[in-house]
Amino acid sequence: MTTRLFKLRPYARHMMWAGPNLSSLAAPLADHGYGVGEALDASGLQAMSSTLVDGEFDGRDLGEFYAEDPQRFVGSKVLPPMAFPILVKRLDAGEILSLQVHPDDEQAKKMESAPNGKSEAWVILEASADAAVYLGIKEGISKEVVEAKIRSGRALEVVRRVPVAAGDIIPVPARCIHAIGGGILLFEVQQPADITYRLFDYDRKEQGIGLRELHLDQGLSVLDTELRPEKCQPQVIAEQEGGRHLLLCELEPFRIEALELEGAFGLECDRLTVLQCQEGFVRLNRKGESLVLEQGETAVVAAGEGAIELSGSGNPAKVLIAIPKN
């Protein structure tokens, strides 16, 4: 029997701005005490790959495993991407992140010789009472003014502050300036790239390094001052006795969906699909295969014919879904 369901173990990244919510994934780094800021739940990035859990492939590096046989994941009907085509992670911001921007596909190819740039989207899981993100340049402000404000240490004066609460869905297209504020735990879907141009970092010093490197020239060259994304509104795709299927966000490279499960629900997976259990637990069944996801656990479902059956236990059980379009 060909395996089509793969449970994953996240790659934990220690960050100077990390909050406490992902601390169970790894002990703080001994040299400076930084906790886990990011859990790369479904990642094929080199040196930052998730690993497979259980079964005959236990412990395998997802990026390497995918590269051995991409068709195993994407099916025979499409030309497979060279690398695992999506990145899903959780991010725990105890403090505000740097103000940054990412290139689009063409800019990434030209500037970094990379296959793609980085658009992303966030689903806010938890947020403090005064939590906010910074997203897009305020209307009517030129790139020259943005540069002057950054160089004078007043960068946040020109960026839109957007209050957020649990359940908010925020698209962040490539070329849009952004920062995640402190007191936020979120689920992020992004293109599989690690290209970040840091524009402003509040003169923070990282232990053993000092001031973190800025990338002002590159960042300003890709920045689009006209991008001011608005929060997405969920749309019902299907509703059955066993639950609801929702579209949360759709960008050119990927889409994010959700399931609210009160029983059994059939989900077509004709494309590679990543599922993460957010509340309760969920069982996945497909053609004789089965696995269970508890809260915070992630699985990859390979493309194939026939629906997978999900059965959830919770009030209701909640699952977030990421699907690459390429």
Image (spheres, rainbow, N blue to C red):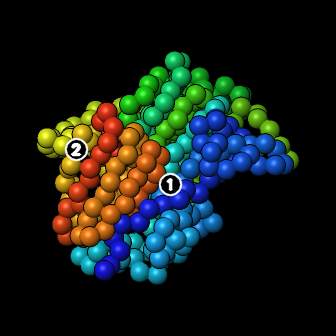
Position above or below: 222 against 151: below
Residue type at mark 2 is Gly
**C-alpha gap between disc 2 and disc 1:** 25 Å
- Tell me the quarter of the picture where residue 241 sits: top left
Closer to the camera in the image, 70 or 194: 70
Residue 121 occupies quadrant: top left
Amino acid type of disc 1?
Asp
Residue 301's place in the image compared with 248, above or below, is: below
Give the residue furthest to the top: 129
Q: Is residue 3 left or right of residue 304?
A: right
Q: Which residue is mark 1?
A: 41
Q: Which residue is mark 2?
A: 263
- Residues tagged 2 and 1 counted as in contact (Cβ below 8 A): no
Q: Which of the two marks, 2 or 1, is nearer to us in this view?
A: 2
| Residue 210 quadrant | top right
Q: Residue at x 30, y 36 (%)?
A: 316
